[in-house]
Amino acid sequence: MKKYSPTTASRRHMTLPDRSVLSGAKPTKKLLAKTSKKGGRNNQGRITVRHQGGGHKKRYRLIDFKQQILNVPARVESIEYDPFRTTFIALVVYANGKRSYILATTGMRKGDVITTAEKCALKEGNRMQIKNIPVGYQVHNVEITPGKGGQMAKSAGSYVEILAHDDGYTTLKMPSGEIRKVLWDNFASLGQLSNQDHNLMTIGKAGRSRWMGVRPTVRGTAMNPVDHPYGGGEGRQPRGTKRPKTAWGKVTGGRKTRNKKKWSNKLIIKRRPKKR
């Protein structure tokens, strides 16, 4: 983690993850897309996600989660920062000249060569079918549906551990602690994702949150009774409701929200442990 000299009160505790691995290159224009700010509002202009708005201008990086160019080596041209995700990204150029962004692993550096194939060398950054990866290896960007692209383990420092191969399925241990099965013909990339110290970052001041597009949050207990189930009362009052609720009275904090009839329930061997 990078710490700063206490030149101001807000700077005193501010920390950032180490970004010395970044190449400092400008993003590739052909791999950028414009995005319009919604401020947490839907197509009717109503706020559906609170506490969003403002923030610095940013352009979306088009990430190749599928990596469908098989048996063609790709060289890492640069490691870059992505404002839309917590992990770093890598710009790779294939032997046929095509460029794309992929998720960068912890040990990935400029000049490394990676490959995507049904079976290839067990090297960090390489992508292959899960059945060809030995038990105990760490993988990321794991497919759930063949050909759809990676959907699991895509945030900073995350990885999935391979536990077993059996009868067309591979057993995985998820970052949450959940143990589940996926088809072993799905693709996954080797290694742990970069920027694993992201969760240790200290924002330092409210203004920095505003740069990130996060607006202030008002506590429910500070509101009036008309605005929140926790509102009202003289001075500081207890919650006053049996179960924790949202501003609209919906029970939260312990209530199960997963559909009992969801098709993938049969693939889950062990649910994630409860937080204590």
Image: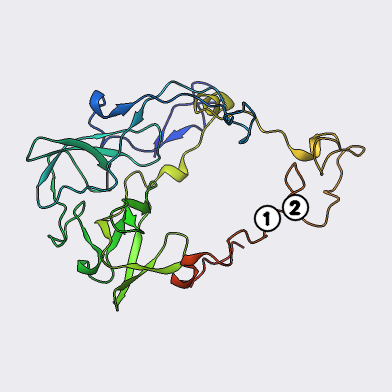
Position of 261 compared to 104: left or right? Answer: right
Residue at 37% in and 25% down:
59
Q: Position of residue 63 (x, y in %)?
A: 30, 39
Q: How many marks?
A: 2
Real-space Cα separation, disc 1 to disc 2, in angstroms: 6 Å
**Placement of the N terminus among the 4 image quadrants:** top left
Q: Residues within 10 Å of mark 1 (few under 14, many from 20)?
A: few
Evaluate if marks 1 and 2 touch, with contact meaning CB atoms under 8 Å apart: yes
Q: Is residue 179 above or below residue 192?
A: below
Q: Position of residue 245 (x, y in %)?
A: 75, 49
Disc 1 is placed on an element classified as loop
- Residue 275 occupies which quadrant of the picture? bottom right
Position of 211 compared to 18: left or right? Answer: right
Dot 2 amino acid type: Pro
Residue at 32% in and 72% down:
169
Closer-to-camera residue (172/169): 169
